[in-house]
Image (cartoon, rainbow, N blue to C red):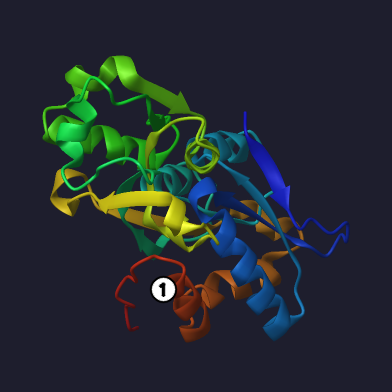
């Protein structure tokens, strides 16, 4: 299982935030900005949304969870692991991406080409972007035709590693990948039509575990996600922004 810690201080006063793998670069930027504004340090635990959800249900000491969808946060809230109903903090988009030698002007035809190599997809059971990729393949009636080429990764970060290293020629990933200091001259990519997969609404939830000592800090970070500063960072990291509901 891929699950790792980003900038993990040892202080007992550190806020622990579980983060979906697609947002591992985004959380670093949010960490820095939030710490500058509040002095509160964040330990980010990164992994596939589904696996992080299982960990939370098994008692993992996380105060806030940033998922790559709303389904997993909704499950947590329904089972009493959340202190309030989850909110959407970002909207993601799916792309297909590969090395510069790949023609993606008509990516559907490219996938059907006998010379096309393997295709990386995040595990659809635990990674929402993997689920979106399978929905897109089904929409274009390609799933059965490319099954033999599919390589399932544990998380979207593993898909990105495959693409960056050239270990696998093509992969479905998040558009935010292109904002992660990637050398785009070595890549080609195409945005997947949003009508081919369910909207990727990324949810955040304030977890019940926060009541054990970090509720004030966790609430501040949860509210910070809707601030103009955080939204600007999210937008500049390759995501679309949800409409902010006015109370």
Image-quadrant location for residue 89: bottom left
Q: Which residue is more in the foreground, 201 or 87?
A: 201
- Under circle 1, the secondary element is helix
Residue 98, image x, y percentages = 38, 42
In the image, taking residue 148 as reference, residue 21 lies left or right, namely right
Residue at 35%, 24% (x, y): give it.
117
Tally of numbered tags: 1
Q: Which residue is more in the foreground, 132 or 189?
A: 189
Q: Which residue is more in the foreground, 112 or 13?
A: 112
Residue 210 position (above or below residue 163): below
Placement of the C terminus among the 4 image quadrants:
bottom left
Residue 29, image x, y percentages = 61, 70
In the image, taking residue 247 as reference, residue 192 lies left or right, namely left
Placement of the N terminus among the 4 image quadrants:
top right
Residue at the top extreme, as displayed: 148
In the image, taking residue 207 as reference, residue 117 lies left or right, namely left
Residue at 12%, 34% (x, y): give it.
140
Residue at 55%, 62% (x, y): give it.
181
Residue 237 position (above or below residue 186): below
Give the class, few, some or many, for how many residues have Cα within 10 Å of label 1's Cα (few <14, many ≥20): some
Q: Which residue is more in the foreground, 72 or 144?
A: 144
Residue 93, image x, y percentages = 31, 55
Residue 206 position (above or below residue 228): above
User: In the rendered image, which residue does mark 1 sit on?
Assistant: 235
Residue 110, image x, y percentages = 21, 33
Residue at 46%, 80% (x, y): give it.
232
Q: Is residue 85 visible?
A: no
In the image, taking residue 26 as reference, residue 94 lies left or right, namely left
Q: Is residue 174 visible?
A: yes
Image-quadrant location for residue 92: bottom left
């Amino acid at each position: 299982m891929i699950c790792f810690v980003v900038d993990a201080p040892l202080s007992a006063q550190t806020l622990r935030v579980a983060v979906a793998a697609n947002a591992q670069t985004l959380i670093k930027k949010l960490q820095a900005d939030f710490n500058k504004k509040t002095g509160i340090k964040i330990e980010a635990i990164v992994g596939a949304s589904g696996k992080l959800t299982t960990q939370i249900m098994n008692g993992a000491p996380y105060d806030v969870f940033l998922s790559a969808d709303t389904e997993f946060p909704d499950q947590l809230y329904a089972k009493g692991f959340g202190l309030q109903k989850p909110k959407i903090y970002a909207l993601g988009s799916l792309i297909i991406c590969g090395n510069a030698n790949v023609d993606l002007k008509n990516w559907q035809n490219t996938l059907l080409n006998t010379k096309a190599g393997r295709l990386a997809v995040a595990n659809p059971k635990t990674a929402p972007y993997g689920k979106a990729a399978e929905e897109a393949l089904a929409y274009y009636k390609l799933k059965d035709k490319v099954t033999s080429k599919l390589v399932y990764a544990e998380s979207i970060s593993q898909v990105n590693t495959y693409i960056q290293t050239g270990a696998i020629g093509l992969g479905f990933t998040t558009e935010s990948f292109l904002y992660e200091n990637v050398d785009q001259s070595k890549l080609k990519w195409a945005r997947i039509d949003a009508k081919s997969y369910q909207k990727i609404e990324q949810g955040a939830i304030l977890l019940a575990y926060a009541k054990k000592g970090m509720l004030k800090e966790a609430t501040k970070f949860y509210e910070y996600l809707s601030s103009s500063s955080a939204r600007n960072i999210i937008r500049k990291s390759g995501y679309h922004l949800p409409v902010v509901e006015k109370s």
